[in-house]
Image (cartoon, rainbow, N blue to C red):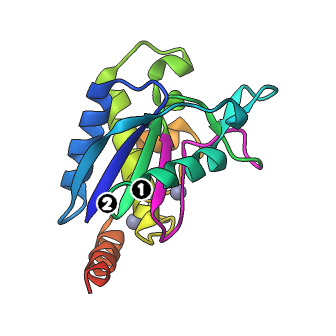
Amino acid sequence: MKIAILQVGMVEQSVLRRIQGSVSQVFPHTESVILKEVLSLPQEAYDDKRGQYNSSFLLDLVREYLKKTDANKILGITSADLYVPQLNFAFGEAELQGKVALISLHRLEPEFYGNSANISLFLERAIKEAVHEIGHTLGLNHCSNRSCVMSFSNTIGDVDRKKWEFCQKCSKQLSKLIDNMHH
Ligand code: ZN
Ligand code: ZN
């Protein structure tokens, strides 16, 4: 499996590279590439009242970039704060059993919660969210095991509670889903 990573707006290269490395490690038989192109944040996706970007709008734009690659899946990574209409914010969004995923780094920064900067904590959170959203594109649903990377995160506490690994059940299902992809 090949996963393309697309920078959406301003994101540090070092952060993209760390996520790229971890994604290739976590998913079996997977390589990932960082696309050279950058999707700039479109004004049309910005909601003035909320001060946030519409996640689904961006997801559609990220999808366009997949066509230019030979990758199976594409993950957009942005520092912008995202929302979906029914929720105050979204850590990320993905098509279930689809091809496109998007994560926001905005609320993963300890500084967002008034805490001091902590790059390793920040990266750990980003990797969890990236793995979670790619997991959805592979067909994994939310998991009730709170320490599984596929458990739903409503708060940053939920993100910190889970690991960036799949529980046994999700792990088994994942192997099956990836096997099916190749046949
Ligand atoms: Zn989810
Ligand atoms: Zn699980």
Above or below, 102 relative to 14: below
- Identify the magenta region: 86-103
The residue that appears at 21% across and 61% down in the rendered structure is 30
Q: Are marks 1 and 2 in contact (CB under 8 Å)?
A: yes
Instruction: In the rendered structure, find residue 175 and report the number of the disc placed on it.
Output: none
The residue that appears at 44% across and 50% down in the rendered structure is 65
Q: Report which residue position mark 1 lands on.
A: 66
* Mark closest to the chain's N terminus, 1 or 2: 1
x, y percentage for residue 94? 52, 57
Number of numbered discs visible in the structure rendering: 2
* In magenta stretch: residue 87: yes
Above or below, 88 relative to 148: above
Name which residue type carries label 2.
Answer: Ala
- Point out the residue furthest to the bottom here: 183
Q: CA distance from mark 1 to mark 2?
A: 7 Å
Residue 162 visible in the displayed image: no
* Helix, strand or loop at mark 2: loop
Q: What secondary structure predominates along the stretch shown in magenta?
A: loop
Say few, some or many: other residues with alpha carbon within 10 Å of mark 2 (under 14 / 14 to 19 / 20 or more).
some
Answer with left or right where residue 110 lies relative to residue 175: right
x, y percentage for residue 113? 55, 21
The residue that appears at 46% across and 42% down in the rendered structure is 159
* Helix, strand or loop at mark 1: helix
Name which residue type carries label 1.
Answer: Leu
Residue 140 visible in the displayed image: yes
Q: Quadrant of residue 69?
A: bottom left
- Point out the residue furthest to the front here: 68
Q: Report which residue position mark 2 lands on.
A: 71
Answer with left or right where residue 145 lies relative to residue 179: right
* In magenta stretch: residue 61: no
